[in-house]
Amino acid sequence: MRRILALLVIAVVVVGAVFIAGHPGHVEIVWQGWQVDTSVGVVVSAVALIVVAASVLVLFGAALRRVPQHMQRRRAARRRSAGEAALTAGVVALASGQPSAARLAAQRAAALLATVPSGGAPMALLVAAEAATQEGDTAAARAAYRTLLDRPDTEFLGLRGLIGQALRAGDDGIALSLAERAWKLRPDAPWPVEALIVLAARAGDWSAVQRTLAGAGRRPGLPAERARHHRGVVLYELSRAAERRGEVRRAARLAAEAQALAADLAAPAGHHARLLIGLGRLRAAARTIERAWRTAPHPDLARLYLEIHPEADSLARAAALERLAAHNPQASESHLAVAEAALAAQLWGEARRHLTLAIAAASLPEPGSAGPSRRVCQLMARLEEMETGDMPAARAWLDRAIGAPPDPCYVCTRCGGGESPEWQALCRECGGFDTLRWRNPPPGAIEGAAPGASAITAPLATTGAQLMLPAPEIPGAGDLPRLLPRSWADGLAAPPQWDK
């Protein structure tokens, strides 16, 4: 387009020059006693020179006026480059565990970037706040986070930092109000919802957790499947509270809803079955346990299945567990439940068959499958001793049990800790809500977990680093992990065979 326009201009100039050359004409100018006689071509050329000279002068003046702006831009670029270098040095110092150096670098970055339009001064404040936190200067960290609240684009970061400060100080009320403010500011962010849930759960206010989940269901922040599972956990806790108040039927109804929403947890199903047994609804309790066994086989469910009719003999008990195991025949817990009942009934062949299947399943090349567990080894030792009296073989299995992988327990999926034989809504290690799952604990899981790491953790993305905002441990979570209960097959009366 520009070439076409240039060609048109040249064409017009050429045509004008040819026209003037063909019509030379005569121009006479009389001004203030002066008389000028010349041709039309000379006059046109003079006018063109004057126009060109005037244009050059105008362009030169405009360039002079832009010189200060160019110099200011260059200074700002140099300050921005130096400020970003200082900010990077501060983040590297944080990652190196040098908070003093990080704070100095953050101060330099803030000074360099403060006058730069759309600079990185807020990030410098963030680095300074984290450096102050590592140094234990909570006042300086809190002041930096409060400064971030003054800017609309960094208010969310300031709220997150202040929530971490409040949690470290044990001010759950302040943390709760700040989390509500953060949720209103960014309803699509998942961590404010999680913070509200954890804080309300720590306070035991399950109705508040339920309201938060109801509000989160109308917003995109919390995934639907996770919100559904959280609702099941809340209903389970509300059911337990109703049971403590003596509202057994309401507790059973809430437990049924909890089991449907959190089908992968054995605790709601076991609680539901116990309530049904207490109400005399034995068949419904059996169906509840059988339904739960398909998705969450657990020793407690097998024990409850036997408690439906505690007057049965050992043969009826073994037959009952055979029926229960049929609902999930591939699960290791099915083989162990039947094997333990068969041992109690002196059905040696059946016990050996199921223990062999459990050992084969534990030997598969899958994550967490590192050979038979301690429970399997102990059962094999009992079998060798009770069936044939082969004490050397029994001792060999007991020796193997010493170094065998631990039995499944509830492990926190967030921190890898919280190892417990009983399910809890909150992890005792990190305070995570609805994070305990029944699984084989990985080797060194508890040792590798960071003590005190919080479920309300705030990873703040900066230049090549993540700044974490830990929270204090959950109070009242217990001092030491409880010992595993004795095997449900020992000392239990056997229920008779009953019709489903």
Image (cartoon, rainbow, N blue to C red):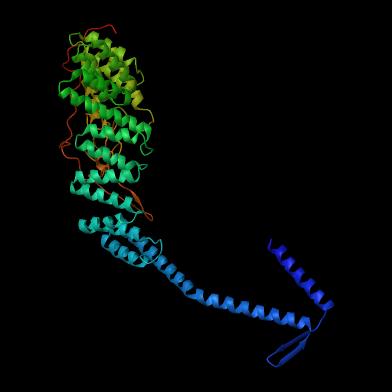
Which one is nearer the viewer's eye here, 219 or 399? 219
Which one is nearer the viewer's eye here, 68 or 456? 68
Total labels: the figure holds 0
Question: Would you place residue 16 above or below residue 403 in this image?
Answer: below
Residue 330 drawn at (x, y percent):
36, 20
Residue 97 drawn at (x, y percent):
28, 57
Extreme-right residue of the structure: 22
Task: Using residue 28 as the reference point, say whether residue 233 is left or right of it.
Answer: left
Which one is nearer the viewer's eye here, 280 or 27? 27
Task: Using residue 485 as the reference point, say whether residue 320 is left or right of it.
Answer: right
Q: Is any atom of residue 384 visible in this view?
A: no
Image quadrant containing the N terminus: bottom right
Residue 197 drawn at (x, y percent):
27, 37
Image quadrant containing the C terminus: top left
Task: Using residue 274 as the reference point, say whether residue 90 is left or right of it.
Answer: right
Residue 199 drawn at (x, y percent):
23, 40
Q: Residue at x 15, y 24 (%)?
A: 244
Q: Quadrant of residue 446?
A: top left
Q: Residue at x 32, y 35 (%)?
A: 215
Extreme-bottom residue of the structure: 33
